[in-house]
Amino acid sequence: MTKLGKKRRKKLQDKVDQISGYRSYHDGDVEVSSGKKGHGVFAARQFLPGELVIEITGQLLSKKTYEGSSYVMDLDQQWYLEPGIPAAFLNHSCSPNTELIHLTKRSLGLVAICNIEAETEITFDYQWEPCDWTPRCRCGAPNCRGWVVAKDGVETMRQLAKKTKKQK
Ligand SMILES: [Zn+2]
C-alpha cells in the first residue's frame, strides 16, 4: 500500500464526500456545513431557550475496556458515548448557546440555553480536563479561556502551558 499524498488525499476525500455525504447532514432542525473553523453544526431554524436542539446518539463504549478518545462523552458510570453524525461535528465555545444533558439510557441531549437564530452555529462547552494535549481555543468569544478547557481547569492549564514552554 502506498501512503496517500496530501494532494491525492484531498482529491479522494472530495470524492468520498460526494459519494457518501458522510460529512454533510441536513434535517429540519440542524445541518452540518463548513464554516470559518471547518465543519460545524448549524441551526436550520430558530430554537427557543430550553428547547431540545439535538438528541445525541452514537456508539456506546464500555468504560471497562475503552480509555476514551477526546471526543467521547460521558453517558453514565459504565458507558461512554462516541457521538455520531451530526453531533460529531459540534464545536466547542467558551460562550456556548447549548448545554449537554443526560436524556435517556442511551442518549444525551443538547438544550438551547439562549435564543438561537437560524443559521447560527450550535456550540457547547466541552469542559475538557487540563492536560498536555489540551488544544488552544479559537472560539473567538470575548471571554475565551484560551484553551478548550473547563472553567475550573484554566489555572492548572496556565501552569501546564508555562512548563511545556520551558521544556521546548
Ligand atoms: Zn474559547
Image: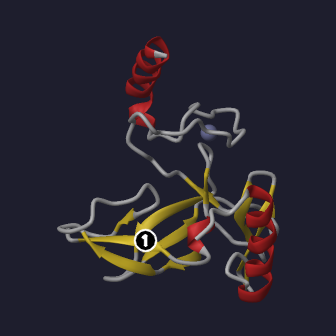
Q: Position of residue 19 (x, y in %)?
A: 76, 88
> Along the horizontal axis of the image, is 89 left or right of 149?
right
- The answer to whether 54 is drawn above or below residue 163 in the figure is below
- Quarter assignment of residue 13: bottom right
Q: Count up the numbered dots.
A: 1
**From the viewer's perspective, is 84 left or right of 23?**
left
Amino acid type, callout 1: Glu
Q: Is residue 62 above or below residue 131?
A: below
Q: Quadrant of residue 102?
A: bottom left
Q: Where is mark 1, residue-wise?
A: 82
Relative depth, front residue between 67 and 76: 67
Q: Position of residue 158 (x, y in %)?
A: 46, 21
Answer above or below: position of 106 versus 38.
Answer: below
The quadrant the N terminus occupies is bottom right
Element assignment for label 1: strand
- Residue 50 visible in image: no
Q: Position of residue 167 (x, y in %)?
A: 43, 15
Residue 164 seen from this side:
yes
Give the side of residue 71 with respect to residue 115, left or right: left
Residue found at x 43% / y 55%: 70
Ligand 1's quadrant = top right
Mark 1 is surrounded, within 10 Å at the Cα level, by few (under 14), some (14 to 19) or many (20 or more) other residues, namely many
